[in-house]
Image: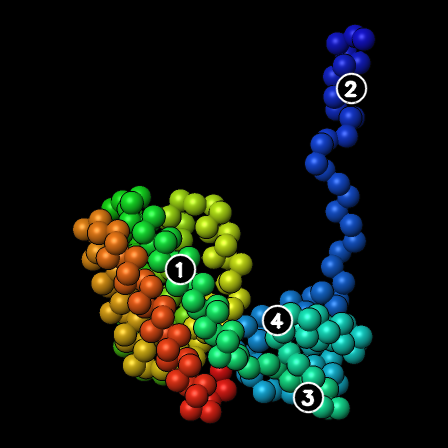
Amino acid sequence: MTDTSKKTSARTSPLKGIRALGKPRSMGDVAYAYLKQAIVKGDIPPGQRLIENQLSAQMEVSRVPVREAVKKLEQEGLVERSGGRGFVVKGLTREEIEETLGIRALLESYAAYLATEHITEAILKKLEDSIQAYKATFTKKGNNTDKLMQLNTQFHEIIYKAAGSGKLYSLINSFRDAIHRYRRPLLACEHYAQVSLKDHEEMVKAMRKKDKKKVEALVRKHILRGMDIIIQELDAGKTV
């Protein structure tokens, strides 16, 4: 085989691991992603009825993709049947809260331990900047829950990445939607939003001293305190 034919063969031979991309996402998939995000963010609260006609009109799609989306949400446990009257957004149960936040406490406290091992001035600066932005938002008047959630998520995300473990990051990321659902009722509570700020400041102080065990304990305490508050809300008859 000549050099030219070898080059031509290399250009035309199938590449390993590459496959057809398939068809673009269906409207059912688009509707599912849209509705799931709205539920996770708390825009559609627990107990809210999902009416096909209403959703179809607001989303400007036919009822078929809406029906497909709701079925997928039911399979994921985000919505449930309400007698013979369609579906409602499912609230969180005590068991789900304890299981999810218990696992999160273990994973994130370990991530913080590892992050402290790898801590640098650049990472500390990012964490401190995030805290200052949170503090500035907290002191503003009005409903700033969405912004507080964004900054809270940013703070923890810096720690996840600083841990330097792709596997651990992937495990934490698999709980992202669930974690987002818990943060809204917590940060909507002004007292907890303030406590959360203080916790973050204590974490960074311990990281600066490279006290891995203290950081690990602070993160675990921070998450389990949030779990206790959500359970108290649930026990008081509030929907979460």
Read off the residue under disc 3.
82
Read off the residue under disc 1.
106
Read off the residue under disc 2.
8
Write the residue at 74% across / 21% down: 10
Tell me residue 189's x, y (percent): 36, 82
Which residue is situated farthest in the top direction here? Answer: 2
Tell me residue 22's x, y (percent): 78, 50
Say which label, 2 or 4, has the lower sequence index: 2
Write the residue at 40% across / 60% down: 106
Tell me residue 61's x, y (percent): 76, 75
Which residue is situated farthest in the left direction here? Answer: 209
Amino acid carrying label 2: it is: Thr
Real-space Cα distance between discs 2 and 4?
Answer: 47 Å
Query: Which circle marks residue 214 in the picture?
Result: none
Real-space Cα distance between discs 2 and 3?
Answer: 62 Å
Q: Nearer the viewer, mark 2 or mark 1?
A: 1
Q: Which of marks 2 and 4 is in front?
A: 4
Query: Do callouts 1 and 3 mark residues in contact (Cβ within 8 Å)?
Result: no
Q: In this view, does 151 lie above or below 9?
A: below
Say which label, 3 or 4, has the lower sequence index: 4
Q: In this view, does 79 lie above or below 164?
A: below
Query: Which circle marks residue 36 in the picture?
Result: 4
Q: Which of marks 3 and 4 is in front?
A: 3
